[in-house]
Image (tube, rainbow, N blue to C red):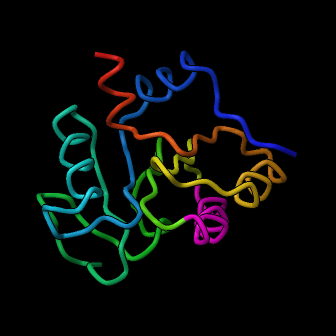
């Protein structure tokens, strides 16, 4: 089965409905894309959690960091992923252990296997190879 992103209005709906975003692969280095996108999301008023086992227990740019998605203490609306494509199936498996709503792989990231893992469990709110910041800017 091939993967196709949702229509633009559905992507905007995800962004409008979201309050809590978990950033998988958040870096503590300001020059990294994950740090910069998280900063932009914060400025849009989203509540953020970083997910990075190496930084768990720390705070990065006022964002609390946990080791795993399952450690986020509240319902996640969007899981924004900054891990290489080969890691997306594992992130999808962890996503299924939560009640997170939208699986979002950043620009350049894609995995048909991850999409199949999610769809096989009835989770079809999936966005891949799209930058959440660009989508927010389209919305503005």
* Vertical order, 80 against 71 (above or below): above
Q: Residue furthest front?
A: 108
Horizontal and vertical percent position of residue 71: 43, 69
Judge left or right: residue 90 versus residue 59: right
Q: Position of residue 10 (x, y in %)?
A: 57, 21
The vertical placement of 123 against 52, above or below, is above
Query: Measuring 20% from the left and 51% from the top, which residue is drawn there?
Result: 36
Which residue in the rendered view is the most extreme toward the bottom? 54
Q: Measuring from the top left, give residue 52's x and y in whole percent.
A: 36, 74
Dividing the picture into quadrants, the one containing residue 27 is bottom left
Determine the image quadrant of residue 42: top left
**What's the residue at 55%, 19% (across, down)?**
8
- Residue drawn where x is 79% and y is 48% of the image: 119
Q: Residue furthest right?
A: 1
- The residue nearer to you, when weighing 85 against 20, is 85
Q: Nearer the viewer, residue 105 or 78?
A: 105
Q: Which residues are magenta?
A: 85-98
How many numbered badges does the structure rendering display?
A: 0
Quadrant housing residue 131? top left
Q: Residue at x 77, y 59 (%)?
A: 117
Please indicate whether residue 138 sits to the left or right of residue 55 in the image: right
Q: Quadrant of the C terminus?
A: top left
x, y percent for residue 123: 72, 45
SS majority, magenta: helix
- 86 in magenta: yes
104 magenta-colored: no
Residue 135 to residue 31: above or below: above
Camera-nearest residue between 138 and 46 = 138
């Amino acid at each position: 089965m091939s993967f196709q992103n949702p229509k633009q209005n559905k992507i905007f709906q995800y962004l409008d409905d979201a309050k809590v975003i978990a950033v998988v692969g958040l870096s503590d280095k300001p020059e990294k894309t994950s740090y910069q996108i998280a900063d932009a999301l914060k400025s849009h008023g989203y509540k953020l959690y970083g997910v990075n086992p190496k930084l768990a227990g720390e705070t990065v740019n006022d964002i609390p960091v946990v080791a795993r998605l399952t450690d986020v203490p509240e319902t996640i609306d969007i899981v924004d992923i900054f891990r290489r494509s080969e890691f997306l199936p594992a992130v999808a498996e962890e996503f299924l252990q939560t009640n997170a709503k939208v699986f979002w792989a950043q620009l350049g990231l894609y995995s048909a296997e991850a999409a199949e893992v999610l769809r096989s469990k009835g989770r079809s709110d999936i966005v891949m190879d799209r930058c959440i910041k660009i989508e927010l800017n389209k919305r503005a």
